[in-house]
Amino acid sequence: MSMTAQSNGKVETLEGNYAIVLMQPQRAPSRYSLPLFPVLPLKSRNEPVRIPVLNNLDAKPGDLVELTETSSFMIQLSAIQYGIPGLGFIAGLIIGYIFHPQSLAIPLELYQFFLGLGGLVLGGYIGFKWAKALASKPEKFFRMERVL
């Protein structure tokens, strides 16, 4: 049994080794499962979502399938949300400690904190760009778990 969140979908068509899966609305607070939601382009969040998924279970058009996220997808989402901004904040603190002016009008800790916030913002921007790149390749992050 998978430890990730499942989403149900219906196979619409087959294109080569991929099945185009129409995501079904879930009973969660959002229309779709929460791991899927962050990487959807904003314009498609109110429209039916179709995801190309490697058809390793030989699903046919009309079959209901259960999709799960790959572990690499979850690791990348965690890095985007927590790792990159956290590293940016810590890098800002260290840079503030190493390269600080000799005479500061504010305490050194406050100077470091402001540079840490700058690193946090820069890390958030890098994470945003990475998330946009992920949103353009949904076929790499979901797999068919089973045919329902």
Image (cartoon, rainbow, N blue to C red):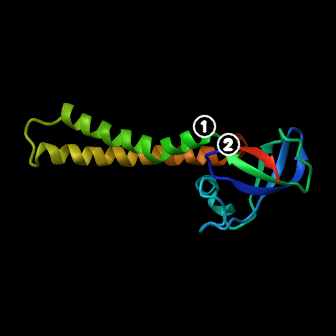
Q: Quadrant of residue 17?
A: top right
Q: Quadrant of the N terminus?
A: top right
Q: Residue at x 84, y 46 (%)?
A: 19
Quadrant location of residue 33?
Answer: bottom right
Badge 2 local density, few (<14 within 10 Å), some, or many (20+)? many
| Left or right of 112 in this view: 61 | right
Alpha carbons under labels 2 and 1: distance apart: 7 Å
Q: Is residue 97 above or below residue 49?
A: above
Of residues 40 and 144, the one drawn nearer to the viewer in this rendering: 144
Q: Residues within 10 Å of mark 1 (few under 14, many from 20)?
A: few
* Mark nearer the N terminus (2 vs 1): 1
| Lateral position of residue 10 relative to residue 91, left or right | right
Amino acid type of the residue tagged 1 in the rendering: Ser
The answer to whether marks 2 and 1 mark residues whose Cβ atoms lie closer than 8 Å is yes
Residue at x-position 62% and y-position 61%: 42
Q: Which residue is mark 1?
A: 72
Residue 43: x percent and y percent?
66, 62
Locate residue 127, reporting x and y percent.
Answer: 49, 45
Looking at the image, can residue 7 be seen? Answer: yes
> In which quarter of the view is residue 108 placed?
top left
Which mark is on residue 81? Answer: none
Q: Which residue is mark 2?
A: 141
Q: What element does badge 2 sit on?
A: loop
Coordinates of residue 18 in the picture (x, y in percent): 84, 42
**The C terminus appears in which quarter of the rendering?**
bottom right
Tell me the residue at 28%/44% (across/down): 116
Most distant residue in the front direction: 1
Q: Tell me the SS state at disc 1.
A: helix
In this rendering, is residue 6 above or below 1? Answer: below
Foreground pick, 84 / 104: 84
Which kind of residue does numbered mark 2 sit on? Phe
Given residues 77 and 102, the one toward you in this image is 77
